[in-house]
Amino acid sequence: MTRPPTVTTRQLLLRPWQPEDLEPLFEIQGDRETMRYTWCAPDRQAAEERFLAYQARGALDGYAPWTATSREDDRGVGWGGLNQDPIDPGWGPEVGYFIRRDDWGRGLASEITAAALHLAFAEHRLPVVDAFAQPANPASIRVLERNGFRFLDWVPALRRNRYRIEREAWEARRG
């Protein structure tokens, strides 16, 4: 089974999901306020099924979302990274993330996104990566735009805007 690499950012340790991550991540994924712009897990079993589906898909692709833990205190603060959605397949490589509400505003989603783009473009040499955000979620849109994503189109089936960054644009931003 291919697993995503462990990555260290300024504030985070990004590592492959493990079964013991279920409880702390379900606390986030099951919080309706935190997840108001995306899928909210109705129970632990649904959350576990989703995490396992992403890991199984990641074994095929060589990348899957990471569990994000704080480098300061090893506390689980979120989940995200480069992935291909196993639940709603066909959209191609994308970046996604969710962060514990108490940790919003610290730039953690931006760190996850930047690490995911490095994995996508520098290591896997993918040509493009997409991301999706509801228009009512300006914080997520700012994360994407800060990382070089540009609005592509509105996707009615998902009720979200699609954003895209191409490898050439990412490389140009890096100098």
Image (cartoon, grey):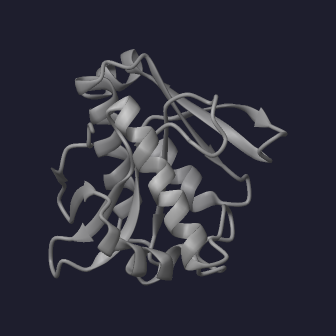
What percent of the width, then of the height, locates residue 78?
39, 68
Measuring from the top left, give residue 40's x and y in whole percent.
65, 70
Asked if residue 7 lies left or right of residue 113, the reply is left
43, 118: nearer the viewer: 43
**Does 28 appear above or below 174?**
below
Observer-nearest of 32 and 165:
32
Q: Residue at x 54, y 58 (%)?
A: 50
* 149 sits left or right of 80 in the view: right
Image quadrant occupied by the N terminus? top left
User: Residue at image x 80%, y 47%?
Assistant: 159
Horizontal and vertical percent position of residue 73: 16, 82
State the quadrant of the C terminus. top left
Depicted 53 relative to depicted 108: above or below: above
Q: Is residue 18 visible?
A: yes
Residue at coordinates 25% horizontally, 80% vertically from top-left? Answer: 75
Image quarter of residue 124: top left
Q: Position of residue 146 (x, y in %)?
A: 43, 45
Nearer to the camera, 16 or 93 = 16
Residue 103 visible within the image:
no
